[in-house]
Image: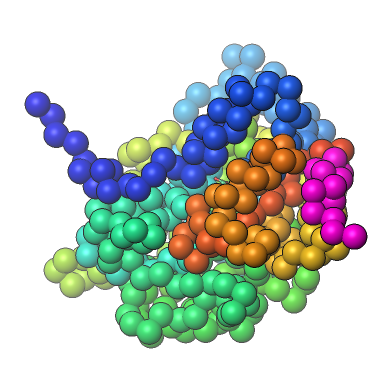
Amino acid sequence: MATINDHFLKLTAGYLFPEIGRRVGAFQKANPDAPVIKLGIGDVTEPLPPAIVQAMHDAIDEQATRDQFHGYGPEQGYDFLRNAIAKTDYQDRNCNVSPDEIFISDGAKCDTGNFLDILGKGNVIAVTDPVYPVYVDTNVMAGNTGPANEQGEYEGLVYLPMTDENNFAPSLPDQKVDVIYLCSPNNPTGAVMSREALTQWVQYAKQNNSIILFDAAYAAFITDDSLPRSIYEIEGAREVAIESRSFSKNAGFTGMRCGFLVVPKELTGKASDGTDVSLHQLWNRRHCTKFNGASYVVQRGAAAVYSKAGQQQTRQLVECYMENASIVRATLKELGFAVYGGENAPYVWLKTPDRLPSWDFFDQLLANCHIVGTPGSGFGASGEGYFRISAFNSRENINEAMARLKKQFKTV
Ligand code: MLT
């Protein structure tokens, strides 16, 4: 009989968002008339910007003709998209990233998990706590951890707590680690790493020969220009960091699927015989073998993000969600909650009243206000007593949700 990957059996619970979906589904089944507003998973709600829609219509029309039909594309992505990304997201912001260091994919989540294919066993892995669960679960699946303890912390992982006590800025590890996951703007806390903090991480990685997996999926939500949007704004980062990005949140692509990974040519890892091997070459080899490229139509849509109209329309989309975040922040503050994030990120992070366990607060909010959020403990032990509200929804739903919160929590 075929055997299985036993490491999967170490996973403590279902993946966070399906688990939330399951609880909400059960609630809706029992309360079919309850008007539930979902501010849990960070899924966009607004339609695709017109410039993107037009580009995809045009691409479909091309696919309908013999002359302009596209079959398999380059696995790494079409030049029209890689060139636009390199110029607008990097070179125009003084980051040295060339088009052939950009690998187009069907999303940042897949890239993050798949990258472990080219890393060896026995690496010491550091993650923040709370953390985007994909970083942890994919390492469990890859056999890079031992079992979980009662708090759901996996043996072998180095957890870097982020709480209000350190302003949600993880400290450098007090031991040598090989791989570090950083996410800024942060999911779930909404905190953004300063240039100084990121510089310290790059220096740590250089001193310890570590690799940083930098998740910049929410870069477009940074409104404060002094904050870095890319790790490549930091000197020396090309030697130590890969960066993942996504079109999901800035351009509404959660249902379209497109993202990319930047793997600089300087970046190396050690082979078991001690030689330095280019991670760019390994990733290219992996990508070409296991992936046939993102769809032509979707890549045309993504490229339209970089047109003049696309830039303006996606900025409007981001501004609309950020205004939601600011409404959520203001309401929660008015109600006396301790509130974080939401200023340069589409997530608002709050302390539960009287440090109520996060899942209890989830259940109460669902039962009393018919609002779905995300329990902080679902992102890690240090998230216990916290809760995440996503700003991704229509203004109407955000206003309605805030009215319900006021009704529930207003004390005077
Ligand atoms: C989240 O809600 O944390 C995100 O939507 C998850 C994701 O982007 O995969």
From this view, report whether residue 218 is shown above or below residue 156: above
Viewer-closest of 123 and 189: 189
Residue 380 in sight from this viewpoint: yes
Image location of residue 281, percent across then percent down: 35, 56
Quarter residue 216 falls in: bottom right
**Lateral position of residue 239 relative to residue 323, left or right:** left
From this view, report whether residue 407 is shown above or below residue 23: below
Q: Residue at x 22, y 65 (%)?
A: 122
**Quarter of the image that includes the C terminus:** bottom right
Determine the main secondary structure of the stretch shown in magenta.
Answer: helix
Q: Residue at x 21, y 41 (%)?
A: 5
Quarter residue 272 falls in: bottom left
Image location of residue 193, percent across then percent down: 62, 73
Residue lying farthest to the left in this orientation: 1
Q: Residue at x 55, y 57 (%)?
A: 357
Image location of residue 137, percent across then percent down: 38, 50
From this view, report whether residue 264 is shown above or below residue 34: below
Viewer-closest of 303 and 172: 172
Residue 218 in sight from this viewpoint: no
Image location of residue 154, percent across then percent down: 32, 60
**Lateral position of residue 116 relative to residue 73, left or right:** left
Q: What span is colored magenta in the figure?
A: 399-412
Is 406 part of what is drawn in magenta? yes
Residue lying farthest to the front in this orientation: 412
**Quarter of the image that includes the N terminus:** top left
From this view, report whether residue 206 is shown above or below residue 4: below
Quarter residue 79 falls in: top right
**Lateral position of residue 281 relative to residue 302, left or right:** left
Viewer-closest of 167 and 283: 167
**Lateral position of residue 143 relative to residue 333, left or right:** left
Is 287 part of what is drawn in magenta? no
Residue lying farthest to the right in this orientation: 412
